[in-house]
Each structure stands twice: as structure tokens, then as C-alpha cells.
Image (cartoon, rainbow, N blue to C red):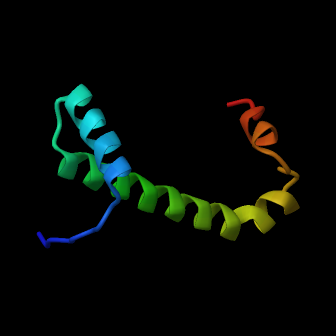
């Protein structure tokens, strides 16, 4: 595991500390989870963009089109 130092302003630190207390977690744990989620979200977004032309060619223009498929 590696260490990352990040500077944040006092307001963000207060908000993060409040959130950590309310969830009974450390600030480091929250930030690690937030970074993990954001990287996964970005990967999913990139994958959707790569697959969009294929989906559109198959007639799937919206998420709703995809969700209406009968199993």
C-alpha cells in the first residue's frame, strides 16, 4: 500500500470529519472509498462511450431502451 498526501481547505476538512464521525469511519477510509468509487465511475463512463456506437447501431438509444428488453 502507498501513501498519498492531499491538501484540503479547512471547510472541506470539517465536512469530511463530520461525515467520518457520523459513519464511525476514519477520514482516510472515507477518502479511499470516494476515490475508489470515482475511479470505477470514470471507468464505467469510458466503457459506455466505447460501446455507444454498437448500442445505437442495435437500436438502443437510451438506457430505457436497454432496460425494456424482455429476458
Q: Residue at x 60, y 65 (%)?
A: 47
Of residue 43 and residue 22, the one placed in the foreground of this image is 22
Of residue 69 and residue 7, the one placed in the foreground of this image is 7
Q: Quadrant of the C terminus?
A: top right
Q: Residue at x 16, y 43 (%)?
A: 26
Q: Position of residue 9 (x, y in %)?
A: 35, 58
- Farthest top residue in view: 22
Q: Quadrant of the N terminus?
A: bottom left
- Farthest front residue in view: 10
Q: Position of residue 52 (x, y in %)?
A: 75, 63
Q: Position of residue 35 (x, y in %)?
A: 36, 58
The answer to whether residue 67 is above or below residue 51 is: above
Q: Residue at x 29, y 49 (%)?
A: 13
Count of picture labels: 0
Of residue 30 and residue 44, the one placed in the foreground of this image is 30
The image quadrant of residue 39 is bottom left
Q: Position of residue 14 (x, y in %)?
A: 30, 43
Amino acid at each position: 500500500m502507498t501513501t498519498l498526501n492531499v491538501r484540503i481547505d479547512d471547510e472541506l476538512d470539517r465536512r469530511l470529519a463530520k461525515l467520518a464521525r457520523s459513519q464511525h469511519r476514519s477520514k482516510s477510509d472515507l477518502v479511499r472509498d470516494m476515490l475508489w468509487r470515482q475511479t470505477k465511475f470514470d471507468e464505467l463512463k469510458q466503457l459506455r462511450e466505447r460501446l455507444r456506437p454498437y448500442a445505437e447501431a442495435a437500436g438502443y438509444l437510451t438506457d430505457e431502451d436497454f432496460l425494456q428488453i424482455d429476458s
